[in-house]
């Protein structure tokens, strides 16, 4: 019930635009004022006014309201990419001399920020597995300002107990940030579990059609205003009105797409688990997943992303399998209408490939909106083409 209101009415002001069902794309850079005093007020508080579309814009505002409600957050900012949302959230909460604790292998560009950019400003990062609270407690230093989480992560789907981490962080006055791209707020609500800032790549499920890049950041209003006044306006990394409109359009069908994708993924996982050439399927909603209970406790669903570890002795077998697939495209992003595969060996020098290394034999699958049978038949024929 609540969600239907979010996807349809919330934030819409149809009486202002001819009762059009789809809102207009307010494609303007600038807004005009009636008086000098009104203009002065806008300069004083740009977060309450439409002044210049690098800041607020009416089309983007509809999206912000809906996304904040979905996350059950006070407020939301929408960025021109998920990477921008990550950068703004972290940058807003650290200064020179500070320390961050991050989960191992966060999203690539989060890790590059921690490893390459922040050290130039004397901000250091300690990585932890994130599966136990003791490990986290041991990594925290007196100058730790941020705990960075990604639950589940998007390759091996490691989880963190979000409410336990949030409780510990609050005691120690540390800001928690969680990348929720895997679940979206439909399947996990980190803010409700006590996390301070939650972000997602809107490029994935929110957009849903592989035609727009965007990022969402939600949290308390005071924090979001600070990020708006500083990081967003300074970097000029807010979403454009047209891309906000595409995200709004994608958002309307998010629940039905996720429901369908989750059902298909479960069927494809079940099929893959019984294949001779499959060593393991890693999927948080599979009973054999090492953190299955935690996944059941804090998530409502698992979407379409999972990883398969193949039983192979050479890189060429993986290449042959992936290149034989007709309906799973070889591509990096996920969350769209189309099914995808991404073999780990694509990011390795061929010489580096080591069949004894389980990670090297991983293929990440994403199930889109196709029928499960259609996808299963595709995998079957690709396995047949894979040499022994
Ligand atoms: C888990 C995760 N977080 C964040 C991002 C960054 O999002 P974007 O590509 O929209 O910048 C991605 C993108 O691949 C991702 O997979």
Image: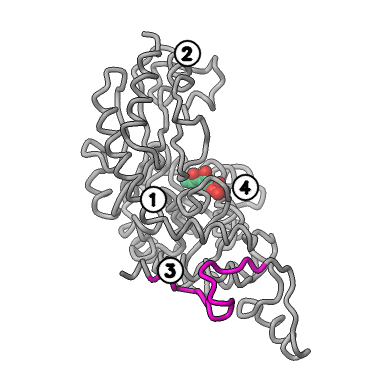
> Does residue 250 sit above or below 46 in this rendering?
above
Q: Are marks 4 and 2 in contact (CB under 8 Å)?
A: no
Residue 171 in the image: x percent, y percent?
37, 66
Q: For marks 1 and 2, give the CA distance.
A: 34 Å
Q: For marks 3 and 1, give the CA distance.
A: 16 Å
**Residue matched to label 4:** 119
- Residue placed farthest to the right in the image? 36
135 or 65, nearer to the observer: 65
Residue beneath the point at 41% across and 16% down? 355
- Assign a secondary structure to mark 2: helix
163 horizontally vs 198: left or right: left
294 horizontally vs 121: left or right: left
Residues drawn in magenta: 5-26
Q: Quadrant of residue 111?
A: top right
Name the quadrant of the N terminus: bottom left
**Residue matched to label 2:** 316
Q: Nearer the viewer, mark 4 or mark 3?
A: 3
Q: For marks 4 and 3, give the CA distance.
A: 44 Å
165 or 346, nearer to the observer: 346
N-terminal of the pair, mark 4 or mark 2, is: 4
Q: Nearer the viewer, mark 2 or mark 3?
A: 3
Q: Quadrant of residue 300?
A: bottom left
Q: Are marks 3 and 1 in contact (CB under 8 Å)?
A: no
**Residue matched to label 3:** 8
- Assign a secondary structure to mark 1: helix
**Residue matched to label 1:** 257
N-terminal of the pair, mark 1 or mark 4, is: 4
Q: Is mark 4 within 8 Å of ligand 1?
A: no
């Amino acid at each position: 019930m609540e969600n239907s209101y979010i996807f349809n009415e919330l934030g819409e002001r149809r009486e202002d635009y001819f009762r059009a069902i789809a809102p207009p794309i307010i494609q303007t850079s600038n807004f005009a004022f009636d008086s000098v005093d009104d203009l002065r007020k806008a300069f004083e508080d740009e977060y309450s006014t439409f002044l210049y579309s690098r800041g607020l814009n009416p089309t983007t505002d509809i999206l912000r309201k809906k996304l904040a409600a979905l996350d059950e957050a006070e407020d939301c900012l929408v960025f021109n990419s998920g990477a921008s949302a990550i950068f703004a959230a972290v940058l807003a909460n650290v200064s020179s001399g500070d320390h961050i604790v991050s989960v191992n292998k966060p999203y690539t560009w989060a890790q590059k920020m921690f490893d390459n950019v922040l050290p130039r400003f004397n901000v250091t990062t300690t990585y932890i597995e994130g599966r136990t609270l003791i490990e986290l407690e041991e990594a925290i230093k007196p100058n730790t300002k941020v705990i960075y989480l990604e639950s589940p992560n998007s390759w091996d789907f490691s989880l963190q107990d979000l409410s336990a981490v949030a409780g510990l962080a609050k005691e120690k006055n540390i800001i928690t940030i969680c990348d929720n791209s895997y679940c979206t707020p439909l399947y996990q609500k980190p803010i409700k579990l006590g996390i301070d800032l939650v972000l997602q790549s809107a490029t994935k499920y929110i957009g849903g059609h592989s035609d727009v890049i965007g990022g969402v950041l939600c949290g308390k209003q005071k924090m979001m205003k600070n990020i708006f006044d500083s990081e967003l306006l300074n970097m000029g990394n807010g979403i454009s009105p047209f891309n906000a409109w595409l995200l709004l359009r994608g958002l309307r069908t998010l629940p039905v797409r996720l429901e369908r994708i989750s059902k298909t993924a479960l069927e494809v996982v079940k099929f893959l688990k019984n294949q001779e050439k499959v060593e393991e399927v890693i999927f948080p909603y599979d009973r054999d997943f090492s953190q299955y209970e935690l996944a059941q406790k804090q998530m409502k669903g698992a979407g379409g992303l999972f990883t398969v570890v193949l039983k192979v002795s050479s890189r060429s077998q993986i290449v042959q399998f992936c290149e034989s697939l007709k309906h799973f495209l070889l591509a990096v992003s996920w969350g769209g209408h189309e099914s995808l595969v991404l073999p780990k060996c694509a990011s390795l020098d061929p010489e580096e490939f080591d069949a004894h290394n389980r990670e090297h034999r991983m293929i990440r699958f994403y199930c889109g909106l196709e029928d499960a049978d259609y996808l299963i038949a595709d995998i079957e024929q690709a396995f047949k083409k894979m040499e022994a």
